[in-house]
Amino acid sequence: MRNRRFRSAFCLLLSLLLLLSGCNTVGQPAVSEPEPSAQAETSTESGEIIAQQHFAESDEVLYNPLMGFAAEADYPEAVGRNTLVYVDVLWREIEPEEGVYDFSAVDEQKQIARWKAEGKRAVLRFICDKPSEEEHMDIPEWLYEKTGDGTHYAYDETHKGYSPDYSNETLIAAHEKVIAALGAHFSGDDFVAFVELGSLGHWGEWHVNYESGIVRMPQAEIREQYVIPYLAAFPNAKILMRRPFQTAKVHGFGLYDDSAGNPEATEDWLDWIQNGGDYSQAEEEDALSAMPDQWKVAPVGGEFNSSLTFDEMLGDNLEQTLSLLRRSHTTFLGPKFPHALDEENGKGLEDGIAEVLKTMGYRQYISVATLYDRENGGSVLSLQWQNTGVAPMYWDWDVCLYYLDAQNQVLSRVSTEIALTEILPGETYTFSVPISSGQSPRDAAALCIGIEDPATGNPAVVFASQTEQIGKMTVLFRFS
């Protein structure tokens, strides 16, 4: 059990504490009365308990920020209540002439202004080669004319396109500039939360079908030149790589698995993370590094694979799929995910989809809230806290306490020192807030807790505790 002390916060009015003294609950409990436990005794080592609430854990899907499904930004019906959108940007879309960057078409097509207004966050990927059924190129024409040493391919009827030679120095120099422009356009706010470091390979996945004659992926020294520009361009976003390359370990990147749900492919990916390995795409030994604990500090994303149907993954094999997500510590998946708008994409599998949503990301759960008088004077609010998800929250948003009046209006607010990034799954934490009797409002009717989105300054995260919710504030106590 881990203990953490907050800075002094505003607290209960002394007269209110005296009124409640000797009681084990405050007002009406938010859940059914708990069975007696050691924690519900009338006194503790620290002093006398004057009020306590126990909360059962909710089994509901929580559409919380920075986790869940990431729907394609140009598919609003699939976005729905999900808090993430997926934005892929093709090089040819934004640099029609050398050095001339135009994001207007991308912004319009991806409905960027709408998603910002609705408080969504984005998963961004820059792509130089996106296979399709038509012959085409995803780098600008002017760049092809200056390089032209890549491979036009058509290795089957649905995979056609152009793969550049990523070792070309002209390409590398132009890539550095376009990533800087991409960052300048998207890094002015916190809309882009996750950047899947694409750039290389089919779909930006750092692999090509070299068996069909496509130029192989370059060696580490050259690949690093595609990585470095992202660091300056996206200083506030979480950057993820498709494989656990040494550079991912050095820079503290997260990882993404675009074969989620496929047991064979994901087992290989998990083995890379656990043990490292070779990178056959570049015929390079020991290019992958063991990063088994990286999920504790950097996110894991990806999307569902295309080789299996959702019927297979979310039907009879649902438990296998959930196990893979737990072992991967997955925070988000998209753009391929089961949005249930048609049979091909999960319609009829809503129960399985709900289980996937409940498995990914963080789930903040307060099981017990206690108010007690300390023997040496003053009072304390103690919170027993768990993260019952599979990953931490990777941003330290403000955790705040709120006192409300009888009309549920906020009378006062205090920011605590809870570090959400340090609340890992599988552990129980106890946080204690010192209370000073002279600082709280006289008309308090409820004490709530909330996690604030810095973009709005408002509570934005729903706790997995079964109790009254006022907006996105979670009620700990209602006072008589």
Image (cartoon, rainbow, N blue to C red):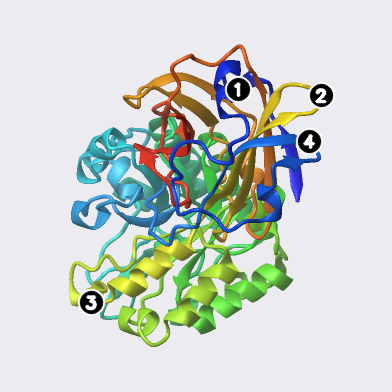
Name the residue carrying label 2. Answer: 376
**Is residue 202 rendered to the left or right of residue 388?**
left
Q: Amino acid at mark 1?
A: Leu
Q: Is residue 292 left or right of residue 300?
A: right
Q: Amino acid at mark 2?
A: Asn
Q: What is the CA distance from the residue labelled 3 to the residue labelled 1?
A: 56 Å
How much space separates mark 3 and mark 2, taking CA atoms? 60 Å
Q: Indicate the position of residue 137 as horizontal and vertical percent values.
A: 30, 59
Query: Which badge, 2 or 4, comes first in the chain's sequence?
Result: 4
Helix, strand or loop at label 1? It is helix
View extreme (bottom): residue = 316
Identity of the residue drawn at 59% across and 73% down? 269
| Quadrant placement of the C terminus | top left
Q: Which residue is mark 4?
A: 46
Q: In this picture, is 300 found above or below 135?
A: above
Above/below status of 143 relative to 436? below
Residue sitting nearer the eye, 480 or 196: 480
Give the residue type at disc 4. Ser
Residue 118: image tag: none
Compared across the picture, whether 238 is left or right of 100 comes to right
Q: Quadrant of residue 51?
A: top right
Q: Which residue is mark 3?
A: 348
Residue drawn at (52%, 47%), measured in percent from left and top? 172
- Residue 131 lies, in percent from the top left, at 33, 67
Quadrant assignment, res 268 = bottom right
